[in-house]
Image (cartoon, rainbow, N blue to C red):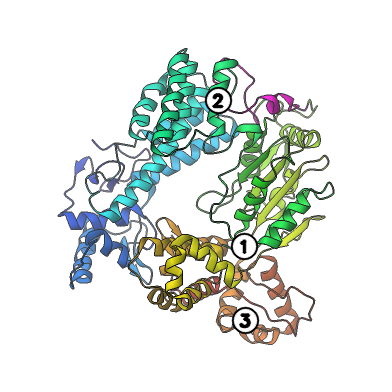
Amino acid sequence: MIRPPARPAPAGTVYFSLLGPLTAVRDGRPLPLGPRKQRLVLATLLARPNTPVPVDVLTDAVWPDDPPRTARKNLQVYVSAARALLGSDSRDGRDRVVHGCGGYRLTIGEGELDTLRFRSLARAGRAAGERGDLRTAARLLREALDLWEGPPLNDLRDSTGVAEEAERLEARCLTVYEDWAETEIELGRAAVAVDGLRDLVERHPLRERLRVAWMNSLHQSGRQAEALAVYDDYRQLLARELGLEPSPAMAALYRAMLGRGRTARPAAAGREAAHGTALPAAPRDFTGRREELRELLALLGSPDERVVVVSGPAGSGKSALALRAAHLLDDGFPDGRFHVQVRREDGSARTPGEVLGELGRLCGVRAPGGSAGPPAPAESTVTAASAATAESAVAADSAVPADATVPVGPERGPAAAAVSQGAADAWQRWLSLHRALIVLDDVPDEAFVRGLLPRSGPSSVVLTARGQLAGLAPVHRIALGALADGEALELLGKLIGPGRLRTDPAAALRIVRACGALPLAVGVGGMRLAVLRHLPLAEYADRLGDPSAALDELVAGDISVRLRMASGWQDLSADDRRALGRLAGPAQEGGFTLDGAMEALGCGERAAIRTVESLIDAGAVTSPAGEVTAHAALYEVPRLLCLYAREREEGRFSPG
């Protein structure tokens, strides 16, 4: 049975479900979706809503082995049937499925597709949890899970392409289930999660986060022997199947259950929880950046540098560098190393209040009213981390009223988020008393982070940003550009294998140069080649060398270089976008000079200088490293950003 969307759609709207078998209903009645190949096309389009799906992806989903010569014509028939089923967009009367240079794009709303509704509820639930509103978080996460009817697209998984999309959807569902279970455990309601966790562990026995939540739920329910048995079973399974041991965080949780009884919080999912650390896994394919890494480690090891900005264009490896350094600095920050993603999955910025709430939760900071940090220790659950950091955090006894607010940085209009004065004071006091490393990843602008930076004390902060964050001072800056050819080839070799790289080194060099030697693009290209084992490197290099097709080729599963470029594009002002679109032509031909900028922009010298420097500040244009006059400088735009800007200038692509 299909559950209707939480936000009812207008009468006559078709509602699709992927979180189970592929089904559709209109006004409560199931709709026939046609023969199997037609359903495969529809499932592939729905799995990537509001995003261009390349024709090759659709072809592989329907005919994974040997597509017929009439494959494209047959696809057109199946797409036409999908158009008839979907009808036109009620907002503008246009077809829901349109064809462009990136492939077929299906336009659909949250009230028409369960995966979009699922994602919206999950985000709202996580945001509520970060604010400390655990009851609302649990309710919203449960609403999302109620849309999950079983293994996604379980009736079409014999298609490799659809199976990959289905596995990605199932991984998201599992993550949300883990979020919900941990929230219920924090609320002291572990019993509601025990049975579901057991069933999921049976289906996913190697998923450690599920095991940790199951251990905690059993322990909180008074079933300590069973909780300890969960760890023992997992340890034996890992040793038998993979020759590995459970993570240090899970081992610490096990010892805590044996020795201390119950404390306050479960381990943060997917993160190291031991020693007050909350970092994503270290990037396995980190390559190059030796000088930049050495400089960053030296700066963070110095008592004088508290804030470092790592800047560079989209895809230049800023996050990887910051995380690499953070993992190597275990001994330097005894009070913890913490990473917070400043943007949401769609590239939009979170509010400063949300980020401060997450920092408070991770570091154990409790503001007056208790909204920023974890609840006080109670009979709830065992944590894998030592509770010493949380207990040493001092809640500020500010005299400011609890409902007072303070903006984080200068006001940025009506949408500027403010945080409580008590929370801001508590955070600054915690920073003044602890030596911790904070990584704030993908910062949109200076105003966002000004109030989060330490005013005093031994803590350090690493900011990653596309722009230069010129309004922050005094800070140390490390600018990242493209990788050297050798470094880019080394990264490609890690992904496709050194043997395959050696079969055609000239083509491999063409590939990395066509990617602009950006780590993201080289990585995506490498992942694509790792799947397409039959594809000669020279043929893939030819595809990437075609300006009209390069961005279409740089897609691996749900990772798209074009979408990353689109996120950076949205950060630019309207004037900067317009200017970048005009400069993309001369930039693609080997860079441009100030005279070239004046000609492309149709303006005088002073206006051209201001425009180019604005784009440099935004991270869209690179300038020479040494001192040189404006007239002598050769400015560059990263190749892939150039291609995206030209697409936008020519109206060939409109992001969903």
Badge 2 density bin: few <14, some 14–19, many ≥20, Cα 10 Å? many
Q: In terms of secondary structure, where does tag 2 sit?
A: helix
Snapshot quadrant of residue 363:
top right
Q: Residue at x 30, y 45 (%)?
A: 18
| Left or right, 3 with reference to 335 | left
Report whether residue 380 is seen: no
| Left or right, 70 with reference to 51 | left
Badge 1 density bin: few <14, some 14–19, many ≥20, Cα 10 Å? some
- Residue 35 position within the rendered picture, expressed as x and y whole percent measured from the top left: 14, 55
In front here: 578 or 449? Answer: 449
Residue furthest toward the top? 222
Tell me: residue 193, above or below residue 13.
above
Tell me: residue 58, above or below residue 182.
below
- Is residue 274 part of the magenta span, yes or no? no
The disc label shown at residue 591, or none: 3
Q: Which residue is drawn at 49% across and 60% down?
A: 494
- Residue 516 position within the rendered picture, expressed as x and y whole percent measured from the top left: 55, 72
Badge 3 density bin: few <14, some 14–19, many ≥20, Cα 10 Å? many
Name the residue carrying label 2.
253
| Left or right, 505 with reference to 310 | left
Marks 1/2 in contact by CB < 8 Å: the verdict is no
Q: What residue type is labelled 2?
A: Leu
- Is residue 380 part of the magenta span, yes or no? yes
- Residue 597 position within the rendered picture, expressed as x and y whole percent measured from the top left: 66, 83
Name the residue carrying label 1.
288
Q: In terms of secondary structure, where does tag 1 sit?
A: loop
Q: Which amino acid does label 1 sit on?
A: Gly
- Segment colored magenta: 371-396
Q: Tag 2 or tag 1, which sits nearer the N-term? A: 2
Look at the image and tell me in which quarter the C terminus lies: bottom left
Snapshot quadrant of residue 438:
top right
